Amino acid sequence: MKTFIALFRGINVVGRNKLPMEQLVSILESLGLKDVETYIQSGNAVFRSKASDATRLATKVSAAIEEARGFRPAVMLLEPRELQMAIEANPFREGEAEPNKLHLYFLGSAPKQPDLAALQDLASARERFALKDRVFYLHAPDGIGRSKLAARVEKSLGVAATARNWRTVTRVAEMAEGD
């Protein structure tokens, strides 16, 4: 069996698309997924599956949630090695000391024509960012809530994205290692 990390986009955000993690576990188990674990309410799960096609499995998971809860979240599946590579490629090591100020945006695909100049124009004096393959790194020392850049990442890159702070990324990686 293969271990997958599921990053759900847009669940339990500002009271919309509510999906308690206990119900998420039940939905995933109903699909035959094993050893399902979740981390915090924003939609992070680790599980094992006989499936080998991540895209097909993500579609199946999304459809099962829609059937059970009435909304269809975007689901990004990563293998543990992909998450580990993203961690190792972090260009902002000093940001790890404040894990809520360092964010990784996992991208649905590699951007074909990212508008990095537009993001640079939006960046505050202390914000730094980097795009590496299918991961966009943002170090926002003043917080992501105030960041004009953070609000425009997806549009400027032109691909679907879901962001996680450093604490979540490393914790989910630890969970995946345990499988």
Image (cartoon, grey):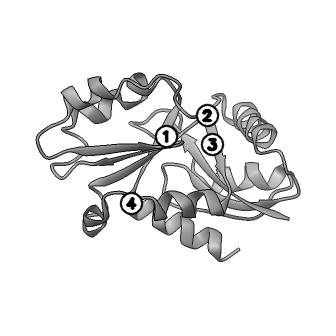
Q: Say which amino acid is labelled 3.
A: Met
Q: SS at mark 4?
A: helix
How many residues crowd mark 1 within 10 Å: few (<14), some (14–19), many (20+)?
some
Is mark 1 in CB contact (under 8 Å) with mark 4?
no
Q: In the rendering, which numbered label is found on residue 52?
A: none
88 sits to left or right of 33: left
How many residues crowd mark 4 within 10 Å: few (<14), some (14–19), many (20+)?
many
Disc 4 to disc 2, how far (Cα)?
21 Å
Q: In the rendering, which numbered label is found on residue 74?
A: 2
Q: Quadrant of the C terminus?
A: bottom right
Query: Where is residue 167 drawn, in percent x and y?
Result: 39, 64
Is mark 2 in CB contact (under 8 Å) with mark 1?
yes
Disc 2 to disc 1, how far (Cα)?
9 Å
Residue at the limit of the structure toward the bottom, as seen here = 178
Sequence-wise, the earlier of marks 4 and 2 is 2
Q: In the rendering, which numbered label is found on residue 76?
A: 3
Query: Where is residue 64 drawn, in percent x and y?
Result: 76, 37
Query: Where is residue 174 drawn, in percent x and y?
Result: 55, 73
Q: SS at mark 2?
A: strand
Residue annotated with mark 1: 162
Is mark 1 in CB contact (under 8 Å) with mark 3?
yes
Is mark 3 in CB contact (under 8 Å) with mark 2?
yes
Q: Say which amino acid is labelled 1.
A: Thr
